[in-house]
Image: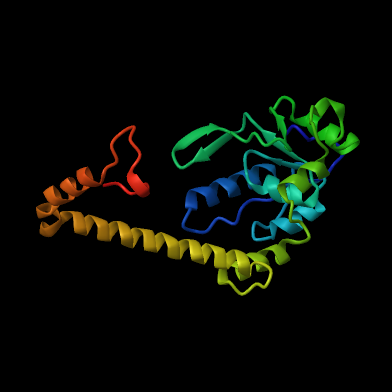
């Protein structure tokens, strides 16, 4: 309704809800029937359509708090998060909570103006109050963009220990694990010894040996050996 008089196409894409959620399927169909044919540029897309294909056709994304904002950012499409849309979650109903720095936070009363600014002036509009460009936000959130496959394979090779680049680091972690096991074994052995009968029975003898072998305070031992 906010965009009825804007010179733009409206693409509506819903999630492909399965039949196990009949209340969602019925709600989506009810809203589609309420708006279908009442706007010359309203296009209700098939819910089974890939969201990436829909984003490839879009100039601006309007949503509530959906993670589709990140997918739009990857495409370089600015997103508007409407904060006073009611989000139904099972029986709970609340307002949206998205606060992403790259999205334009809007209210229903501001929605038309924000869409107009993004369509006419782009994300660089001074009225948006952003500290970075849209591409700057994209490069920060997707720092491996264009190299994700290489980074993923490096990670898998590091985990398997077969990468010639990361194998020294892998050996270091393995040595660390072996050292931890040895320390654990020594601590277990010490506790077993201290709980043994022979250790408790020889305690007076060990205490006597410690007193005899102790160096008196302020007097150096002859030859460097305590007597």
| Residue that appears at 80% across and 28% down | 128
183 displayed left or right of 125: left
108 displayed left or right of 186: right
User: In the figure, residue 159 lies in which quadrant?
Assistant: bottom right
Q: Position of residue 27 (x, y in %)?
A: 55, 45
| Residue that appears at 71% across and 35% down | 101
| Residue that appears at 19% across and 49% down | 209
Is the residue 24 above or below the residue 125 in the image? below
- Which part of the image, by quadrant, shows the N terminus? top right
User: In the figure, residue 98 lies in which quadrant?
Assistant: top right
Q: Could you tell me if residue 49 is visible in this image?
A: yes
| Residue that appears at 68% across and 51% down | 13
Is the residue 110 above or below the residue 21 in the image? above
Q: Position of residue 18 (x, y in %)?
A: 52, 58
Give the total of numbered labels. Answer: 0
Q: Position of residue 148 (x, y in %)?
A: 72, 61
Q: Position of residue 110 (x, y in %)?
A: 74, 26
């Amino acid at each position: 309704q906010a965009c009825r008089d804007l010179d733009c196409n409206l693409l509506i894409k819903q999630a492909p809800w399965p039949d196990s959620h009949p209340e969602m399927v019925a709600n989506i169909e009810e809203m589609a029937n309420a708006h279908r044919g009442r706007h010359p540029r309203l296009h209700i897309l098939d819910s089974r359509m890939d969201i990436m294909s829909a984003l490839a056709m879009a100039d601006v994304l309007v949503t509530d708090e959906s993670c589709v904002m990140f997918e739009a950012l990857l495409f370089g499409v600015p997103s508007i998060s409407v904060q006073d849309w009611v989000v139904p979650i099972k029986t709970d109903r609340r307002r949206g909570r998205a606060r992403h720095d790259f999205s334009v936070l809007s209210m229903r009363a501001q929605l038309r103006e924000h869409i107009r600014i993004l369509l006419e002036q782009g994300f660089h509009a001074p009225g948006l109050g952003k500290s970075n460009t849209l591409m700057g936000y994209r490069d920060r959130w997707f720092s491996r963009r264009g190299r994700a496959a290489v980074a993923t394979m490096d990670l898998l090779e590091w985990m398997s220990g077969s990468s010639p680049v990361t194998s020294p680091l892998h050996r270091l972690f393995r040595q660390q694990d072996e050292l931890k096991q040895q320390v654990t074994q020594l601590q277990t052995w010490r506790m077993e010894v201290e709980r043994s009968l022979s250790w408790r029975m020889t305690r007076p003898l060990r205490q006597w040996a410690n007193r005899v072998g102790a160096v008196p305070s302020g007097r150096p031992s002859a030859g460097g050996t305590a007597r």
